[in-house]
Amino acid sequence: MLRHLGVHAPRLAFNFKSSLIHGGRGKTLTTRAFSSSAAVSPPSKAIVYEAHGEPDTVTKLVEVPAVEVKEKDVCVKMLAAPINPSDINRIQGVYPVRPEPPAVGGYEGVGEVHSVGSSVTSLSPGDWVIPSPPSFGTWQTYIVNDEKVWHKIEKGVPMEYAATITVNPLTALLMLEHCVTLNSGTGDAIVQNGATSMVGQCVIQIAKSRGIHNINIIRDRPGVDEVKERLKNLGADEVFTESELEVKNVKSLLGGIPEPVLGFNCVGGNAASLVLKFLRQGGTMVTYGGMSKKPVSVSTSSFIFKDISLRGFWLQKWLSTDKAEESRGMIDRLLSLVQEGKLKYKMDLAPFEDFNTALDKALGKLGSQPKQVIKF
């Protein structure tokens, strides 16, 4: 059984430690005996890692025997699941909360109900569901877990969006709505670095849908004009490169946009300092990532004379504080934005049999790539 704080892990029909001890692909795993009347899942295939390390070295495809479907259980045939940076960090052993190996990779995804236990009333075969809060072990073809783990969603949502809605879009929405009170349509503004990230793109579009101005900072790169145009097509009010902000007064570049009350930092280093320069008196910067691996430095004058506040945001901590029902309502709102064409981002759907190539893309071995989503 895989467990972690506040989240139910899918039940697996074998003991990893005794079954995978010798490693290798296609190994026969130890199965559990069932009574002749027990309902069971189909056999599954899973991406497993037996020890922490680099994902392209330690992950392998294994066959997973059938799992008993108990009276309150739901067996879900997974349809799609993304490869997120946090998935990679968990496998590497550097993410703060992670399952102990051996474990199945993946943390979010979407599936279709295959069968239900005798006491299940809220779900039926054919329903589309997502694990909510998200749960370890989504990189497998079938998952059996308790009914209360699954959140039913509309089947009309594109599969890749349903699979990716729980981590990045929810992070964007929560930061916009739970960190500082922003007044929709009345002139409030936010500023962010890392604007081309999936969270960054979601921030732009959600802010636009709420009538909140957004100022975006991106790194200097080839083809920057095309990147700026793409972000503005999503709803960005302004997009600046870091070098364009090497001026004495960055606020002079805002034109008629008000000084931001809220800033988001996922980069650190100089990019974080640029976010701070834009903030108005009493503004708040929220850090939710550190892609540059450089610290956030703040001048004494920013604290004393601008009364700047700094805080962090971690989705997994928020989800572990009994927020399941609230998060499900927010997920439904985000999926409605997707269906209305107001929330979109680039993704690559990759067949499960091409997992190794998709993983290489997610690891950056093949250059800059869209989010990789595995289709089972």
Image: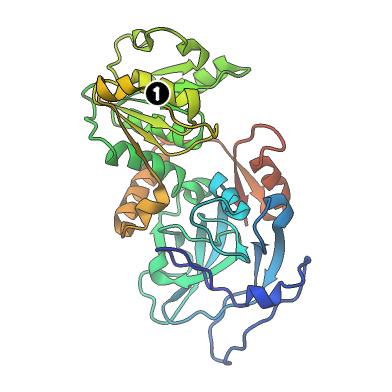
Q: Residue at x 66, y 82 (%)?
A: 31
x and y, in percent, of residue 96 in the image? 49, 53
In the image, taking residue 48 as reference, residue 121 lies left or right, namely left
Residue 255 shows up from this direction: yes
Asked which secondary structure carries label 1, the reply is: helix
Looking at the picture, does residue 144 appear above or below residue 187? below
Q: Which residue is mark 1?
A: 275
Q: Nearer the viewer, residue 172 or 155?
A: 172
Residue lying at the far front in this picture: please name it. 300
Q: Residue at x 48, y 30 (%)?
A: 268
Image quadrant containing the C terminus: bottom right
The structure's colour scheme is: rainbow
Looking at the picture, does residue 117 appear above or below residue 134? below
x and y, in percent, of residue 152 in the image? 40, 60
x and y, in percent, of residue 179 in the image? 29, 38
Looking at the picture, does residue 347 appear above or below residue 86? above
Can you tell which quarter of the image residue 288 is in? top left
Q: Within 10 angstroms of label 1, few (less than 14), some, or many (20 or more) residues?
A: many
x and y, in percent, of residue 19 in the image? 70, 76
